[in-house]
Image (tube, rainbow, N blue to C red):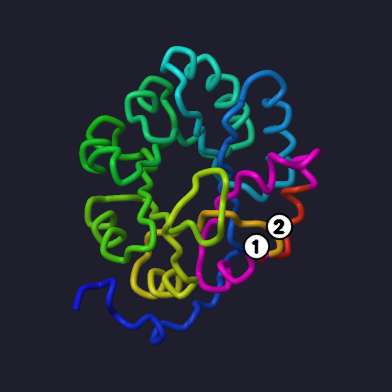
Amino acid sequence: MNADEADLSIFPPPERIEPAKLYLISPQDVAGAFGDRLKAALEPGLASAFQLRVKDVGEHELTRLAEPLQRICADADIAFIVNDSVSLAKRLGADGVHLGQGDGDIRDARAVLGPTAQIGRTCHDSRHLAMEAGEEGADYVAFGAFYPTTTKPSDYRPEPPILSWWSALFEIPCVAIGGITPDNGRPLVEAGADFLAVCQAVWSAEDPAVAVRAFEKVLA
């Protein structure tokens, strides 16, 4: 029996020592007034990381877009994470990189970015992939999509007990991702998610600060 076939019911939800935090994922459009929206979203103090996830834009242009957002995160003491690209993370001096399953080896990223970089790995609904990521030195693993999402449509649908399993056996933080809102996020926090990754629930709102504050009771 491999890890993905083991019974998850034997792992009870953990007792929370600290509240979960938000992990903000950027929208596709981060130009113009987005910096002001990012400042507003960070103001409530519920987020600890921001991931720049912009597709189909060249590295030179993405660097130009990223730099003011990176300064905003630094001023707020928020980790600035680059999606997919180790080379862009290196170029920007970002706090870390998030790697999908096809985005290269964690050990190679570590060699490029150094020992203090935060390196995360998408693990879908697979305990096996998460264990591999941990062995390779990931700083966090991400499971999802837990709910339907238009940000990054996914056929993977893990159940919340995978978060309980991970939290019971490993000290590496876990991130829940995919269609998460203030209305559906609580079961994921109760199951053991250290971070809720959110995108549309915040950026589709007229006031990002209000949207973020809506998660406060969910994270506790």
Look at 58% across and 24% down and name the residue there.
Answer: 71
| Quarter holding residue 82 | top left
Look at 33% across and 83% down and name the residue there.
Answer: 7
User: Which amino acid, by three-letter code, is at mark 2?
Assistant: Phe
User: Which amino acid, by three-letter code, is at mark 1?
Assistant: Leu
Residue 215 disc label = 2
Residue 49 disc label = none
CB under 8 Å between discs 1 and 2: yes
Q: Which residues are magenta?
A: 184-210
Q: How many marks?
A: 2
Look at 41% across and 85% down and name the residue there.
Answer: 9
- Relative to 99, is 3 above or below? below
> Horizontal placement of 135 versus 179: left or right?
left
Find out whether residue 190 is within the magenta segment. yes
Of residue 122 and residue 113, the one placed in the foreground of this image is: 122
Q: Residues within 10 Å of mark 2 (few under 14, many from 20)?
A: many
Indicate the position of residue 193 as horizontal and vertical percent values: 51, 64
Quadrant of the rendering where the C terminus is positioned = bottom right
Indicate the position of residue 97 as horizontal and vertical percent values: 39, 37
Of residue 129 and residue 195, the one placed in the foreground of this image is: 129
- Relative to 179, is 187 above or below? below
Q: Residues within 10 Å of mark 1 (few under 14, many from 20)?
A: many
Q: Residue furthest left?
A: 1
| Quarter holding residue 15 | bottom right
Look at 46% across and 58% down and name the residue there.
Answer: 144
Find out whether residue 123 is within the magenta segment. no
Q: Secondary structure at mark 2?
A: loop
> Horizontal placement of 1 versus 84: left or right?
left
Identify the residue under disc 1: 219
